[in-house]
Image (cartoon, rainbow, N blue to C red):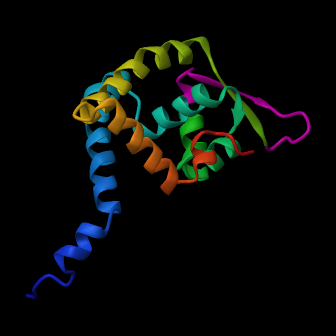
């Protein structure tokens, strides 16, 4: 048995723990209260959301501009296609690339889940004023690659 190896001050300065706690809380609620009823695992929701966010796009574009791993994204795309939520069309110039688009059923699913997902986050951030929320977003953008976050970099 041993004592803690990391002083409390160093843990307090390790911001990733706070960020992870926030995202984990949001994910748990989203999974348990929203996605479960839709039969959508989180990764499939993330990909569906990304296609709604970026418009018709290639998986490589999504993985470059999000935290989705290419292999996991490929499996999620196959599952979404099987569920009829997206369609993939072969690129005539590059047979290995497929353009992903939401189907009407995918759009309907997104439009049903998106408000619930936003409400889920709003429940967590509701303690912040509008000014604090904007400051939090600004600070997170500062810590992240804000161009990739906003989908502006190609």
Residue lying at the far bottom in this picture: please name it.
2
Image quadrant containing the C terminus: top right
Residue 93 among magenta residues: yes
Residue lying at the far front in this picture: please name it.
131
Residue at horizontal 70%, vertical 46%? Answer: 60
Judge from the rendering whether residue 86 lies leftward or rightward of residue 133; answer left or right.
right
Residue at horizontal 84%, vertical 34%? Answer: 91
Residue at horizontal 52%, vertical 30%? Answer: 49
- Any part of residue 26 in sight: yes
Residue 28 among magenta residues: no
Q: Position of residue 125 (x, y in %)?
A: 28, 35
Residue at horizontal 59%, vertical 36%? Answer: 77
Q: Nearer the viewer, residue 127 or 88?
A: 127
Q: Is residue 148 above or below residue 127?
A: below
Magenta segment range?
80-96
Q: Is residue 94 above or below residue 119?
A: below
Q: Nearer the viewer, residue 92 or 47?
A: 47
Q: Position of residue 105 (x, y in %)?
A: 54, 13
Image quadrant containing the N terminus: bottom left
Judge from the rendering whether residue 22 lies leftward or rightward of residue 110; answer left or right.
left
Q: Is residue 108 above or below residue 26?
A: above
Count the marks. 0
Q: Nearer the viewer, residue 106 or 129?
A: 129
């Amino acid at each position: 048995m041993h004592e803690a190896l990391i002083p409390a001050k160093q843990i307090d300065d390790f911001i990733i723990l706070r960020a992870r706690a926030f995202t984990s809380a949001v994910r748990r609620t989203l999974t348990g209260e929203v996605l479960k009823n839709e039969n959508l695992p989180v990764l499939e929701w993330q990909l569906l959301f990304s296609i709604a966010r970026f418009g018709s796009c290639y998986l490589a574009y999504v993985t470059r501009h999000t935290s989705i791993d290419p292999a996991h994204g490929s499996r999620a795309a196959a599952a979404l296609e099987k569920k009829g939520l997206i369609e993939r069309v072969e690129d005539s110039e590059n047979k290995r690339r497929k353009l992903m688009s939401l189907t009407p059923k995918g759009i309907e699913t997104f439009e049903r889940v998106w408000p619930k997902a936003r409400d889920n986050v709003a429940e967590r951030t509701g303690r912040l004023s509008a000014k604090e929320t904007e400051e939090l977003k600004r600070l997170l953008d500062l810590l992240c690659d804000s161009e990739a976050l906003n989908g502006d970099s190609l």
